[in-house]
Image: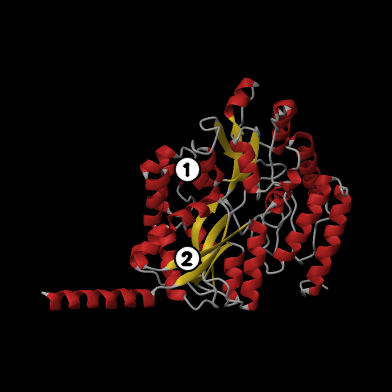
Amino acid sequence: MRTWLRWTIAAAFVICSNAMARAETITIATVNNNDMIVMQQLASHWEQQTGNKINWVVLEENVLRQRVTTDIATGGGQFDVMTIGSYEAPIWGKQKWLLPLDDFPASYDYNDIFKSVRDALSSDGHLWAVPFYAESSFLMYRKDLFAKAGLTMPAQPTWAEVEGYAKKLTDRAHQQYGVCLRGKPGWGENMALIDTMVNTFGGRWFNEKWQPQLDTRPWHDAVTFYVNLLRDYGPPGASSNGFNENLALFSTGHCAMWVDATVAAGFVSDPKKSQVVGKVGFAPAPIAKVPNGNHWFWAWALAIPKSSHKAAVAKSFLQWATSQEYIKLVAQTNGWVLVPPGTRKSTYDNPKYIAAAPFAKQVEHAIQTADLDHPTAQPVPYTGIQYVAIPEFQAIGTTVGQLMAAALTGQSTVDQALKQAQSQVKAAMEQAGYTQ
């Protein structure tokens, strides 16, 4: 008996030692959005299942983009998993900076992922990142405030109508603002919204010869409208507000309207965190002169840099975090209304999700109708709605975003900001060899 016990203990020690030897710690860089915070909270399930550990680096959106871009371009190897988007994935994949993610087992069911989302994260026949959630943009509004003021939201609002509603619904004495919009500078912050406004005002970043168009009438009209709308009817300090800041304002009842990412719908409908549950209506993103490019497309996705030495473990995590099983885990833990949206057909076929998220079909329609290949009324040489899918855009978009923020705060006029933007983008495109 003692011999058997000693053998059992020894065998158990060997098994534990081997498991510990195989265990790895991977470093994941991600954005501080709510869905990613939930992923961080639930990752202990994966750690328990696999014996591996995660070192989290959770950053504000602009900082995340700077950190991962620097690391990937230099082959720094700081991260085993990066949270990137539909802008970076195909570009970095073509550069061979990422590992392809085409070899997950059949149970992962790639065909369950919306084709538009897969295509946005692919290039050269490979999927370079797997989607954690996908989004378009739309208009959220307070149904109770509209009813009290005798207002009715049309099926397709215009920006002019939004301005009229904002004027009637602004009550600064009670910290109620007619509209909240992104003002924080960044190519994925204020420029994500401004780009869609420029599109629907009839503008474009470049003509067919890659010549910048930032000093044209549509840019002037769109940016002037944006600046005046926020100054007159937006919250104070709007130039510091990105997605998270506006989410907090809207959820606490300070915004009558908010044009932003469709992913926000779940959070403003969460009774644990939102004070406006049941009071929110949803409408398509506003249009101005043309319908083209009025609502964006984006997918936050998980990718593995080629510099990672723990690719197998990283793939295991990606497979878990973007699976149907993970979505069910979120539903069991936090409710169906908070599951990562926009990626899988099975989510939108699930009656439990539809019952919990009455906005679901509207979000799905917005994502499916966002046309990355034809974002503008006039022809353009690029793809992308709220970004231009070229490597140089991250730098020029950030520069222009800072200039637009300066116009918003009154440090410059709109015309001065656009003139400077045109000059800087023109120089950057000439230096990159797009134009002479």
Q: CA distance from mark 1 to mark 2?
A: 32 Å
The image shows a total of numbered marks equal to: 2
Q: Is residue 102 visible?
A: no
Nearer-the-camera pick, 334 or 367:
334
Image x and y of residue 310, in percent: 47, 76
Q: Amino acid at mark 1?
A: Ala
Are the residues flagged by discs 1 and 2 in contact, CB closer than 8 Å?
no
Within 10 Å of the Cα at label 2, are there few (<14), some (14-19), or many (20+) other Cα atoms? some
State the colouring used for the structure image.
secondary structure
Secondary element under disc 2, as helix, strand or loop, is strand
Q: Residue at x 74, y 43 (%)?
A: 238
Image quarter for residue 322? bottom left
Relative placement, left or right, of 26 versus 217 is left
Question: Which disc number belongs to residue 54?
Answer: 2
The residue under label 1 is: 360
Image quarter for residue 392? bottom right
Image x and y of residue 324, in percent: 38, 56
Nearer-the-camera pick, 347 or 304:
304
**Relative vertical location of residue 154 with respect to residue 108 in this rendering, above or below:** above
Image x and y of residue 289, in percent: 72, 43
Secondary element under disc 1, as helix, strand or loop, is helix
Image x and y of residue 410, in percent: 86, 45
Q: Residue at x 80, y 46 (%)?
A: 408
Q: Amino acid at mark 2?
A: Ile
Q: Is residue 221 visible?
A: yes
Q: Quadrant of the N terminus?
A: bottom left
Q: Residue at x 41, y 50 (%)?
A: 330
- Which of the marked residues, 1 or 2, is nearer the chain's N terminus? 2
**Relative vertical location of residue 70 with respect to residue 166 in this rendering, above or below:** below
> In the current view of this chain or complex, which residue is farthest to the front?
2
